[in-house]
Amino acid sequence: MCEVGINFKNINLYNAEMQKGMEDKLFFIERLPKNQNYMFVDFGCADGSMINALASIYKDNPNNVYIGYDISDEMIKLSKSNYHGPIYAKVKFTTNWDDCRKNGSNLFVNRKKVLILSSVIHEVYSYAKDENDIVDFWNKVTSDFDYIIIRDMCPSKDINRDARKSLTNAIETSLKVTNYQLKDFSEIWGTFTNNKNAIHFLLKYRWQVNWDREVHENYFPIYVEDLIKKITDKEFYKIDYLERFRVPFLDNCIKEDFGIELEDYTHIKAIFSKKQLAPADDYND
């Protein structure tokens, strides 16, 4: 069982940051088949923003089901208090994974099950107690769901190389970071002369309020090549959509604060579906 991790110094700030770019986080909506009933499971739902957005988008479909799952009791309590979607919508926020599984409930009948992993894979790896927790996580992911939606930080293996001197110098001389941030990060992750470490730092330097928590999180626990293999290896799933990208907002912050531009893709958006589902021609591009 994964741990919740270091307490937030400002949980409201954390959730506000996670709400940014919600439109982009919902990239999968236009790529799922229309005229279908769904059961959406948001794994690591935090304050419930994703569930709120989905319930509002599908407000004309009272047959959908929305489940927000999180291991944090505090987040689930917050999700319940924040919900403002349609009152008729079938919405549940829970810390019990069994609520998200096909267990005979009529909530699972005649609905395609969609698992949403939005900025959560790196947290699972960061707070897992041991390798068994990681195995358990991927078993959950590839078990009952018709679609697996992923949006997270996930670089390619070629991010492992020597960093440009201009990149290293920009980090070490910037007035936008503190000496203790540089020291803390280096002690945990290593030198900025490694390109992966340098980019890793640039994705988290803005978290100064919740720094004690964020500095310990591994933003790059898995490469995109390994992630694809992990989901498709069982031969149950195929890739319907895959996009590698950088977040424009972060790109702009890095350019303004450090005077540099990144070369590597840092994030992915992906949709996997069970192979027995409709062929790709039936999807909306």
Image (tube, rainbow, N blue to C red):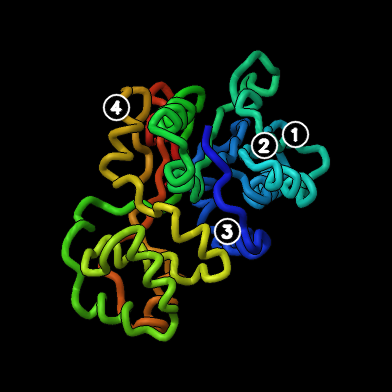
* Separation of marks 3 and 2 at Cα, in angstroms: 19 Å
Q: Amino acid at mark 2?
A: Tyr
**Three-letter residue code for mark 1:** Lys
Residue 18's disc number: 3
Of mark 3 and mark 2, the one earlier in the sequence is: 3
Residue receiving disc 1: 90
Q: CA distance from mark 4 to mark 3?
A: 31 Å
**Residue at the spot x=34%, y=37% of the render?**
239
- For mark 1, give the secondary structure: strand
Tag 3: amino acid: Met
Nearer the viewer's eye, disc 3 or disc 2? 3
For marks 4 and 3, the one nearer the N-term is 3
**Residue behind mark 4:** 233
69 left or right of 161 in image = right
Camera-nearest residue between 193 and 151: 193
On the image, which quarter does residue 230 sit in? top left
Judge depth for marks 3 and 1 and give the one in front: 3
Answer few, some or many: residues within 10 Å of disc 3's Cα (few below 14, many 20 plus, some between 14 and 19): some
Distance CA(mark 3)–CA(mark 1): 24 Å
Label 2–label 1 contact, CB within 8 A:
yes
Labels 2, 4: front one: 4
Q: Closest to the observer: 113 or 282?
A: 113
The one nearer the camera, 192 or 60, is: 192
User: Which numbered marker is on residue 7?
Assistant: none
| Residue 135, quarter of the rendered image | top left
**Mark 4 vs mark 1: which is more N-terminal?**
1
Dot 3 or dot 1: first in sequence order is: 3
* Residue 66: assigned label: 2
Alpha carbons under labels 2 and 1: distance apart: 6 Å
Where residue 53 appears, as percent x and y from the top left, is: 66, 51
